[in-house]
Each structure stands twice: as structure tokens, then as C-alpha cells.
Image (tube, grey):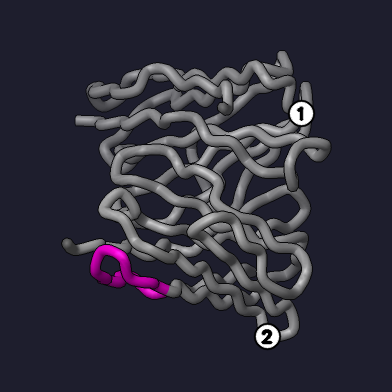
Amino acid sequence: GQNIDQPTEMTATEGAIVQINCTYQTSGFNGLFWYQQHAGEAPTFLSYNVLDGLEEKGRFSSFLSRSKGYSYLLLKELQMKDSASYLCAVLNDYKLSFGAGTTVTVRA
Amino acid sequence: EADIYQTPRYLVIGTGKKITLECSQTMGHDKMYWYQQDPGMELHLIHYSYGVNSTEKGDLSSESTVSRIRTEHFPLTLESARPSHTSQYLCASSDAGVSYNEQFFGPGTRLTVL
């Protein structure tokens, strides 16, 4: 089975940094994705990690530790438009298993 | 930008009706997926396909059926809709040779069964 855990909600102020943690226990692993989903819209790709370490992509960075079954998404210089749900998803044999998502609210 | 389309975007229908949710992609991706997502909840995989004439059930049991007669088309059918089928249905596609095997999502169909 698949078990992917992430916090339900986080709140931060504009310009700040927020770190969203994700822990997973899955039957297989071919990589970990982070997606952003605004309310009522489709998920959009943010990052992908398959090897341990940090991947940086502009204001967003993602980290993976396969031995610990742990990842985080780091959002820097928060903007109001970053208010959304952030989904952690584990890839196994071309199929994605998603966590329930973390709703991030950015306050002015 | 991903070229994956879903129709209709919104559908309100009565109990017992047969419905088909359409999904098409123009990227030539071999793999396609259907997810079900209730508001504020996680996406659950209900069907997937690795290519033409290939269909498999996903992790969440669903009364819907799918077909994959053409690479670009992956429709989902409910023979007799019930209020418990009310949800958002998201279609996605991917290809092993493209960008981390990333899944590209369509805009979704929000289904309400009265």
C-alpha cells in the first residue's frame, strides 16, 4: 500500500519562506513530484526528485532523502499568488500516489 | 504548455443517466490516467492505460469504465449515475520519454448527480 503524509494547512506572510514536509511509505519508488493546485483547477508540475538532495528552481526548491522516506518543498519570497494546495506525489511504475495536499495561505 | 482537454467542464445530471466524460491529448503520450478528487481531498487513481487497447483499474474502486481505442482519446463512462458519483474527475497523460515522466493534467470535469 501507499502512505503519504503532509500537513493539512500552513499560513505565512508575503515575502516569507515556508517549508512543506512530506513523508512516504510506498511499495515502490521511481521518484517524487510536487504539484501546485489552485482551488477548482488542475494540478500543475512544480518539481521532481529521484536522487537524494536539493533541486532548486527559482523561488521553489525540493529536497529528497530516500533512506528516510522524506521530502520537502521550500517556497521562498512568498507572493499572494502562491496561495494554493501543494501536493506531494510518489511515482511507482508510471503511477502516481498523492498525499492529501497542504493548503498554503499567504497573508499580506 | 500541455495540450490535454476535457469535456464537459461542468455537468449536472439526474440519477440513472448514462454519461461519458471525454479526455483527449494531442501530445502523442502513450500513458493516460483518470483521477477522482472530492473537494479538499487527495486525488485517487481510478483508471489508467499504458497504450492503445490497454486499460487497468486504479487504486480506488470505481463503477466507471474506460476505453482506449486511439492513443489520443481516453473516455470514461458511467452507465448509471448516482449521487455518490458527484466529484471532480481529472484526466492526465504522460510519456516515458518526456520530462521525468511527468503527468500533465487536463482542466477537469466537475460532475454533480442529483
Give yes or no for contact between labels 2 and 1 (Cβ–Cβ under 8 Å).
no
- Residue A13 in the magenta stretch? The answer is yes
Mark yes or no: residue B49 visible. no
Q: In the image as oriented, which residue stretches furthest toward the bottom? A: A68
Q: Position of residue A60 (x, y in %)?
A: 51, 60
Chain letter of the residue carrying label 1: B
| Coordinates of residue B107 in the picture (x, y in percent) | 42, 30
Task: Select label 2 or label 1 by which is in front.
Answer: 2
The image quadrant of residue A26 is bottom right
Residue underneath mark 2: A68
Q: Badge 1: few (under 14), some or many (20 or more) residues near its Cα, within 10 Å?
A: some
Residue at point 64%, 33% (across, down): B93
Give how far across and how far down residue A58 sits, in percent. Answer: 54, 55
Please provide the residue range marked out in magenta.
Answer: A7-18
Residue type highlighted by circle 1: Asp
- Residue at the spot 58% in from the left edge and 18% down from the top edge: B24
Residue at the image point whose x is 69% and y is 57% from the top: A91
Q: Secondary structure at mark 2?
A: loop
> What kind of residue is marked 2?
Lys
Residue of label 1: B30
Residue displayed at 65% across by 38% down: B48
Residue B9 in magenta stretch:
no
Q: Position of residue B5 (x, y in %)?
A: 50, 20
